[in-house]
Amino acid sequence: MAGDVTAAAAPTAETAAAPLLSVNNIEVVYNDVILVLRGVSLVVPKGEIVALLGANGAGKSTTLKAISGLLKTEDGEVTRGDVVFDGERVNGIDPEKIVRKGIFQVMEGRRIVADMTAHENLRLGAFTRRDRGVNDDIDMVYDYFPRLKERTGLAGYLSGGEQQMLAIGRALMARPKLILMDEPSMGLSPLLVKEVFSIIRRINKDQGITILLVEQNARLALQAASYGYIMENGKVVLDGTSEALSSNEDVKEFYLGQGEGERKSFRNLKSFKRRKRWL
C-alpha cells in the first residue's frame, strides 16, 4: 500500500506511542451465538483524535460498547482479547466503574433525558464525581455551547443540534480522559455538522481529552483525526495516518466519493476489490 497505510494487524509504531487505550484482538458475541467482532485491534494515543470508519453494520458501535462496558445491556460480551485503558484491563468491568476510570461514551442518537432540563442533564453527567467543581464545569460547558444556557425548558424540546451539544457537554461533566463519540453528525444539517466538529477539535485541544470517533462522514472525521481505522464485517481492514487514508485510492473511492472516472457500485465491487486489496 502507498504511504503510511497498512493492512490492519498489529498497531504501527506511530500509534503505539503513549497509548491511552489498546484494544487487543477482541471478539464479541451476542446472545452466545452471533459473532460480531472478529479479532479487532486498535490503539488510541493519549491526547489524540482517532477515527473509526466503516459502513453500517461493520462493527463500529459494537467496538465502542466493548470499550465502555455497555455490551452487557444488549446480551453481548467480549469472549476473547483484552481492552486495556490507562494500563488496566477494563473488559468485564461494570459500565459505572469504567466511567469512574475516565471513559465516557456519547451514544448514537444523543440519548439525553428528554423530561429534564439541559442544566439537569449536565448535572447528571457528573453523577460519578464527589468534588465541588461541578458548577464551574457547567459554566465551562456553556462557554463551548452558549446556546444551551439560553434553553431553560425541557431537553426534549431542543433541536437535534442542541441535543448533540448537550450530549457532548454531559460527557465533559464527567471529566473523562477518553470520550467515545458515536456518529455525532447524524441527523444534523451541514452547517451544524461543521459547528459540532469544530467544537470537538477545540475540546481535544483545550482540555487534552482523547477522542475515539465513530463517524459516517469520513471526510470530516479524517480532517479532525490524526489517525484512522477502517472496519468491514467485524474486522479492521485498513489503518493509517489521516493524510495517508485520505490519499488512498480505495478510501477515496468507497468513502470519500473521489474515485477516478465513473463512480462504481460499492455493492458490486466490495467483495472482490476490497478483499483482494485489503485482506
Image (tube, helix red, strand yellow):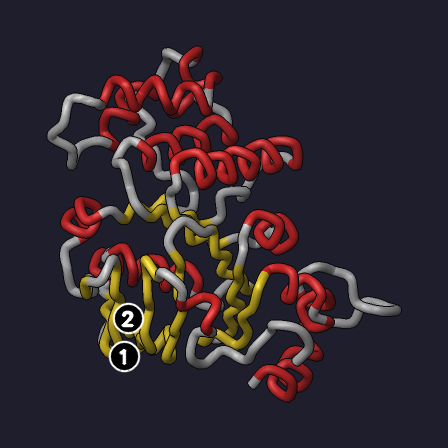
Q: Is residue 48 above or below residue 145?
A: below
Residue 220 location (% of width, % of height) = 62, 48
Q: Amino acid at mark 1?
A: Val
For the N terminus, the image quarter is bottom right
* Quarter occupied by the C terminus: bottom right
Q: Are marks 1 and 2 in contact (CB under 8 Å)?
A: yes
Q: Position of residue 156 (x, y in %)?
A: 39, 25
- In the image, 74: left or right of 230? left
Relative side of 258 to 13, left or right: right
In the picture of the structure, the residue carrying the numbered disc 2 is 30
* Element on which disc 2 rests: strand
Residue at screen point 25% across, 57% down: 86
Residue 234 visible in image: no
For label 2, count other residues whose C-alpha is less than 10 Å away and answer few (under 14), some (14-19) or many (20+). some
Total labels: the figure holds 2
In the image, taking residue 70 as reference, residue 201 lies left or right, namely right
Is residue 260 toward the left or the right of residue 52 in the image?
right
Q: Quadrant of residue 251?
A: bottom right
Q: Kindly identify which residue carries mark 1.
A: 33
